[in-house]
Amino acid sequence: MTEACLQHLLTPEEKRFLDLFLHEATTPPFTGPATVVLHSHGIEYGDISYLAWAYEQDIPRTGFAVGHAADVVPPLPWPDRQSALRRNEQIQQIWEERRRGSGATVSTH
């Protein structure tokens, strides 16, 4: 494996939070404590869509479910919505580089 393949895209804090949030976002009732924390900071799923992609790169699915349920929410890894948006943009750049490297076309629409 190359060094790029071994490099993790997310911080441990991001993985912990996204593990719970993505589970909530993909299983009924499609809400929970992590979703409430995210929304309380003005962050929506669409604001962190590339971070969700990075989660699946770092922690590939072993079944239908994404992440895990938990009673205690890990701290939000971004202090505010702008920080989450900037981090999502960083991951988007990585996604775009990988798409170009694979020869796939990236749509900007």
Image (cartoon, grey):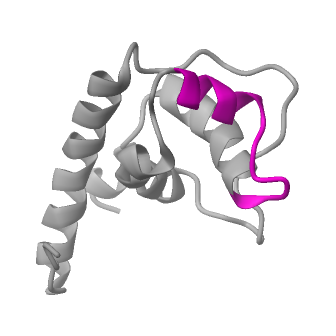
83 to the left or right of 21 = left
Task: Identify the residue at image location x=74%, y=47%.
Answer: 24
Nearest the eye: 63 or 17: 17
The C terminus, quarter of image: bottom left
Q: Quadrant of residue 70?
A: top right
- Residue 57's place in the image compared with 71, above or below, is below
Q: Is residue 27 magenta?
A: yes
Nearest the eye: 69 or 100: 69
The N terminus, quarter of image: bottom left
Image spot of residue 44 (x, y percent):
47, 42
Task: Identify the residue at image location x=75%, y=53%.
Answer: 30
Image spot of residue 12 (x, y percent):
52, 27
**Most common secondary structure along the magenta stretch:** helix
101 to the left or right of 83 = left
Task: Identify the residue at image location x=22%, y=33%.
Answer: 86
- Residue 105's place in the image compared with 33, above or below, is below
14 to the left or right of 85 = right
Q: Is residue 95 magenta?
A: no
Nearest the eye: 13 or 38: 38
Q: Which residues are magenta?
A: 26-40
- Residue 49's place in the image compared with 34, above or below, is below
Image spot of residue 53 (x, y percent):
43, 58
Image spot of residue 56 (x, y percent):
52, 58
56 to the left or right of 98 = right
Task: Identify the residue at image location x=60%, y=15%.
Answer: 75
